[in-house]
Image (tube, rainbow, N blue to C red):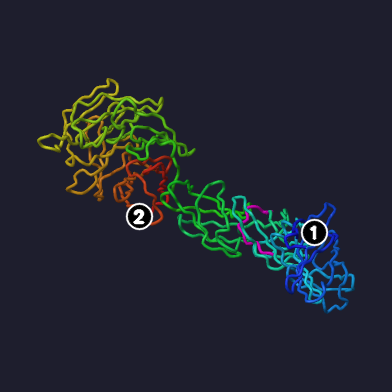
Amino acid sequence: MEKDDVVSQKGKPSASFELKGTHSMKLGEKYWVAAFIKTSKGIVYSKVIDFVSKGSLGFLFSEIVAPPTVFFGDTLEVRGSNFSKIPGNYRVTVQGVPAKVLEVSGLGFKFVLPDIFPIGEKQVTQGLYVFEISVAGKVLELEYPLNFRQANFKIDPNQVVNYEDTLVIEGSYLSSESIEVKYFAENGNEYKLPVVDFSSSKIRFRPLAKFQESNPEIKVTIRGKKYILSNSFKLKAPEVDSGQAFLRKTFEWTSLKGKNFNIHYPEWNSLSFGGLDLNYEILNVSPTNLTFRVLAGNDLYIPRNIEVYPNNSGKNSINSVKLTFTDPVLPFLNAEGIFKEDYGIGGGVPMGDYGYFFRVNSIYKFTPGTRKMELIVENKNSDALLANIFTLKSPNGKIYSGGHADNVFFYQSSPEMFEFDPSNNTLVKLPKIPSDVIQPLSVYATNKYLYYEGGFKITPAQGYVEVNERWRYEFSTKTWKKLASQTEIKDYSLRLKSFWYKGKLYQIGVENREENFIVLQEFDQLKETWVTVASFSNQDPIESEVIPIIGNEAFLFTPTRVIKINLDSFSESVVQNIGEEHSMLWFSTMSVLGINGKIYSTNIGFQVLELDPAYFTY
């Protein structure tokens, strides 16, 4: 026959097939033979038989007989005619690996599948394995389908292991040239678990992964086939020794003692904080210790006291570690989506268990007990800002503020003033003061009156001009009156801040910059005069619109430091740890308010911070 008459069809026959015939032609010293193999579905598979011969055509191949399913070490039989009867003339390989030949005869022989041979993608997808049969120098190469037995696994749901242990999976028919064990976490991460060793009945591997479940599902690949195994082992939950408690600043490292940690990599351990979403970092881990720190950020809430639970494989430890933060400043609330402005111009005013923040043209109610911030009022009836000049609380239960529409130094008239009533959330604009004082020296309120005195104005001819006049607004008549007396304070550019303490009205601030000291004055309501009762060494102006009062102590926020004043003894102390590295989050010294022993402030952006005087150092 001609070479072009040879037909090659590839398919997947059954384990036993019949050789229908061969055709050959001589090409020099080689004989080229095509074998046509027939199954029950007709001719579905053929293979070119290529062997070297200088003489006769050699043996004739008929069929291979194999069990319906095979495994390494099983015996297969080759049938045909004209085979050599000398065992030494035989050489058989399966996937390139030599196989042992048994029971040779003229009609065929038997051979044993090697203990291990490579299995590639073609074997997995098509089931075809490469055989090479050599008899007395005559070679037959063919692809033959084998149906390997499925791997069987004996699942032990009671196998409880630690991260230091070597895990064991037992079963049968597990032999393979290579075995792969993988864990796929719920978050999409994939981990290849190192296989220590394996046999036909056992696979040992190490749990090198950040497991998210205590009973993880793993994928085992044997002879190219993937098996999903569930409940094959259970990881021990982490545990910490009871009674551990620490005082720490955020960013400081804490080492907790316990067991069942994931020792392979620090980042493969997890911590939980009783439902809080905190940023943290794990430095190192050993079988009995885990070292971590909490990272403070303005976008988080970090309470003063937290409980820390190691949380590996989806389970918290039973015990917790108590951690108390000693930072003077901690993030308290993220008001993004509530604050309409990303910066604050205005003060903060406390009202018992809650307070109000004035920001540009909006007023927000802040309740620390529930960590709630809500928009109450927007100033839509005036172009002026609500409180870029002053903010204060009156004993009549209302809040008063004043502001210009833009930079105060661009104006030659007094600011717009507003009255906010927290009882009904109403905002009313007050009658304009009949004065051209653009920036007052002092603003304060009693039950009956709002006082506005001193400060400066700007004239085209003279520029900044000090003003000593005093004005009084009567709440009942809603009228302004200019008082006959004049202010005696010399420095018109540094506004004094007022507050009430034990039924008395005080104001505090730099009285005279040239003399560089702060004075505390008490207001005589009958005489409508101020009397100096104490002076202090601080030389900086007070920036906070409202003076936070905690117990019998007033806290003065200046551009460079925080000062505590005892209002009974008039002693002063400078807070030392505000500004300490990793202990201060940036906050607005203008917008601070004291509520239930704590001080709260906003910052640039949408955050509210908590300052706790109990953790100030002096």
Up-down: is 596 above or below 62? above
Tag on residue 147? 1
Asked if residue 281 shows in the view, the reply is: yes
Helix, strand or loop at disc 2?
A: loop
Q: Amino acid at mark 1?
A: Asn
331 vs 26, left or right, is: left
213 drawn magenta: yes
The residue lying toward the viewer, choosing from 201 and 122, is: 122
Q: Could you give the CA–CA distance between mark 1 and mark 2, rounded to whole angstroms?
A: 79 Å
The residue lying toward the viewer, choosing from 338 and 397, is: 338
Please rate how many residues cluster around mark 1, counting C-alpha atoms within 10 Å: few if below 14, some from 14 to 19, many from 20.
some
Up-down: is 320 above or below 30? above
Image quarter for residue 6?
A: bottom right
Residue extending farthest to the top is: 477
Please identify the dominant SS of the magenta region.
loop
Helix, strand or loop at disc 1?
A: loop
Find residue 341 and report its horizontal and vertical position in percent.
Answer: 37, 37
Report the number of numbered marks.
Answer: 2
Q: Which quadrant of the figure contains the C terminus? A: bottom left
Find residue 92 and report its horizontal and vertical position in percent.
Answer: 79, 72
Q: Which residues are magenta?
A: 205-216
159 drawn magenta: no
Please rate how many residues cluster around mark 2, counting C-alpha atoms within 10 Å: few if below 14, some from 14 to 19, many from 20.
few
Q: Amino acid at mark 2?
A: Gln
Image quarter for residue 129?
A: bottom right
User: Which residue does the numbered mark 2 point to in the structure image?
Assistant: 576
Asked if residue 16 shows in the view, the reply is: no
Residue extending farthest to the front is: 2
Q: Residue at x 43, y 52 (%)?
A: 327
Tag on residue 283? none
State if disc 2 and disc 1 touch (CB < 8 Å): no
Q: Which quadrant of the figure contains the N terminus? A: bottom right
